[in-house]
Amino acid sequence: MAAVHAVFQDGVFKPSHPVDLPERCEVEFEPRLVHTTAPLGTAQDEIYDILSRRFSGGETDIAERHNEHQP
């Protein structure tokens, strides 16, 4: 059988591709770290940080125009 590449997430090894094994069969393997990646939350934290900053859109009171495009 060929090597199975998987990602360890939420306490479970999740294969990257379908694996040709019977359902619920027992397997034994020795995990080997292929490469390290940044924690999944890192990029998301950076995005939220950017979105939390204030930006000037030129409008001083957007709430004033709330009903402008309502049907």
Image (cartoon, grey):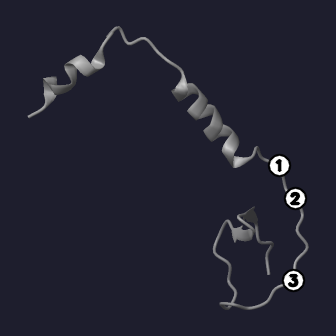
Point 15% across, 27% down: residue:
69
> Which label belongs to residue 28?
3
Point 70% across, 40% down: residue:
42
- Crowd around label 3: few <14 · some 14–19 · many ≥20 (10 Å): few
Quadrant of residue 70 within the rendered picture: top left
- Crowd around label 1: few <14 · some 14–19 · many ≥20 (10 Å): few
> Which label belongs to residue 33?
2
Residue 29 vertical position relative to residue 23 in the rendered view, above or below: above
Task: State the residue in front, 29 or 53.
Answer: 53
- The residue under label 1 is 36
Residue 29, image x and y in percent?
Answer: 88, 77
Question: Which amino acid lies under the numbered mark 1 shown in the image of this protein?
Answer: Thr
Residue 45 vertical position relative to residue 34 in the rendered view, above or below: above
Badge 1 or badge 3: first in the primary sequence: 3
In contact (CB < 8 Å): disc 3 and disc 2: no
Task: State the residue in front, 56 or 4.
Answer: 56
In contact (CB < 8 Å): disc 1 and disc 2: yes
Residue 66, image x and y in percent?
Answer: 21, 25
In the picture, measured across the screen, residue 2 lies left or right of residue 44, that is right
- Per the image, label 3 sits on a secondary structure element best described as loop
Real-space Cα separation, disc 1 to disc 2, in angstroms: 7 Å
